Amino acid sequence: FLMEELGRDFFLRVQLTRKVVWFVCPATGNVYHSAAKPGGPGGRSRPGKRYCHLCAKCFSANNFQSQHLANLHRPGRPTALVTVPDEAGGVHLLWRPPVDPTGQGPGITGYRVRVSVNDGISWQVETLPRHSLGKTR
């Protein structure tokens, strides 16, 4: 496939599990497979690669998700976290979103917030949109 057919952000969007995609690297014109390890059908004698549209080049498929994306393109942590009580006995959680110094990151679309209402004995996860005020009991 050409990356234009898959979408340049394909390897960021799609989690490949036991699927191998052959693609043309836009940076070099070389053909690569996306498998993390060599072997298997189709002549995969070398480990595969995956294209990072943010860096505009290919990287080892073996560590693409766990190292490349996690270390170079994961958004930072929110700052200035504040809880504000409301009239119903709950709280609003306010924060300042992290700033992407490169302006090329994938962007934040929402937040997962772990909440405990019993001093940490059990936890629940709430997903909040990017621009919302978190409200919990």
Image (cartoon, grey):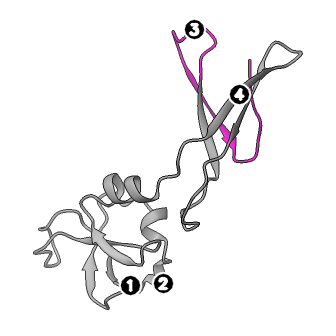
> How crowded is the residue under tag 3: few (<14 C-alpha within 10 Å), some, or many (20+)?
few
Q: CA distance from mark 1 to mark 2?
A: 6 Å
- Which residue extends farthest right? 87
At x 52%, y 52%, the residue is 75
Q: CA distance from mark 4 to mark 3?
A: 18 Å
The residue carrying mark 4 is 82
Q: Viewer-nearest of labels 4 and 1?
A: 4
Q: Amino acid at mark 2?
A: Glu
The residue carrying mark 2 is 5
Is 44 located above or below residue 130 in the figure? Answer: below
Numbered circle sitting on residue 42: none
SS label for mark 1: loop
Q: Amino acid at mark 1?
A: Phe
Q: Is residue 66 left or right of residue 97?
A: left
Q: Which residues are magenta?
A: 115-137
Residue 20 location in percent, x, y?
Answer: 29, 69
SS label for mark 4: strand
